[in-house]
Image (spheres, rainbow, N blue to C red):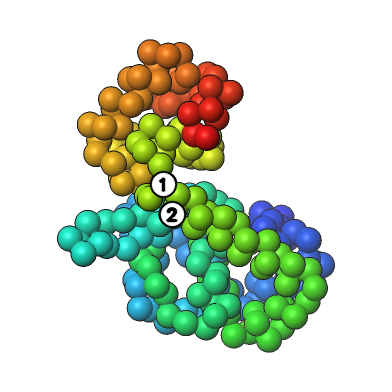
Amino acid sequence: MMKNIQNDYAFFSFLKEADIERLKEISFKKSYKKGEILFYKGDESKYLHLLIKGIAKLYTHDFKDNEVIIHNLLAPALIAEIVNYEEINFIANCSFETDAEVILIDYKRFKDEFLLKPDISMFFIKSLTKKIKYLESFINYNIALNSIEKIAKFLLENEKLLPSLKHVKIAQILNITPETFSRQLAKLKKDKVIGNDRGTIKILDYEKLQRIAH
């Protein structure tokens, strides 16, 4: 049993065994299928969500009702923990790009029993800082960069995700058309910056890709 606890709660491996046991008591694990919803924008944030398997996406819709992806999360990762911390309702939707498993932690109990612990506080700060950096990148993608720069930056920052994402999904994440994405990929392949391994993009020349991404 302890082996399973350690696997599921490896994200909190810095905690003492007794704390991990208590964390298990105030949480439960749930499995989700690809496409299922974890929460909708406006839902109350009763749980701290720890993604332990799969890929989740946070998304909203623009004024034309087009889906706008804010963040793709690869396990292990906390999902939208800033909403818990601020004690507000969720400001985006969350669904799954693959089959997934999530540990749902009673946030009120977590806050009362764990959040004031120095290790947990620092852990939370680091996790939130990562999300802020991603938000900066998101703004940069959608305002400051052209399509080839967006693609180069995305490939460099999300190399581990590439085997799990179809080309049309990456285009959607970057808010560019599939045609533009394919055209720019072809240009990168021609210049031998990237390759293709059974449909998965492979980076061949990191230095050149970094220069394109600025």
Give the image location of residue 15, x and y in percent. 78, 66
Which of the pair 136/154 is nearer the observer? 136
Disc 1 target residue:
144
Task: Give the quarter of the image for residue 206.
Answer: top right
Element type at mark 2: helix
Dot 2 alpha-carbon crowd within 10 angstroms: few under 14, some 14 to 19, many 20 or more: few
Q: Amino acid at mark 2?
A: Ile
Is residue 150 visible in the rendered structure shown here?
A: yes
At 27% from the left and 56% from the top, the residue drawn is 67
At 39% from the left and 17% from the top, the residue drawn is 189
Which of the image's four quarters has the N terminus? bottom right
Give the image location of residue 32, x and y in percent. 40, 59
Instruction: Tell me if label 2 and label 1 are in contact, CB under 8 Å.
Output: yes
Which of the pair 141/192 is nearer the observer? 141
Give the image location of residue 180, x and y in percent. 26, 32
Is the residue 45 above or below the residue 14 in the image? below
At 45% from the left and 49% from the top, the residue drawn is 140
Residue at the limit of the structure toward the left, as seen here: 64
Of marks 2 and 1, which one's residue comes earlier in the chain?
Answer: 2
Q: CA distance from mark 2 to mark 1?
A: 8 Å
Give the label, 2 or 1, closer to the camera: 1
Which of the pair 179/111 is nearer the observer? 179
Q: Amino acid at mark 1?
A: Ala
Is residue 53 visible in the rendered structure shown here?
A: no
Task: Give the quarter of the image for residue 33.
Answer: bottom left
Disc 2 target residue:
139
Element type at mark 1: helix
Q: Is residue 59 left or right of residue 193?
A: left
Is the residue 194 above or below the residue 76 in the image? above
Give the image location of residue 93, x and y in percent. 36, 66
Q: Is residue 149 left or right of residue 19?
A: left
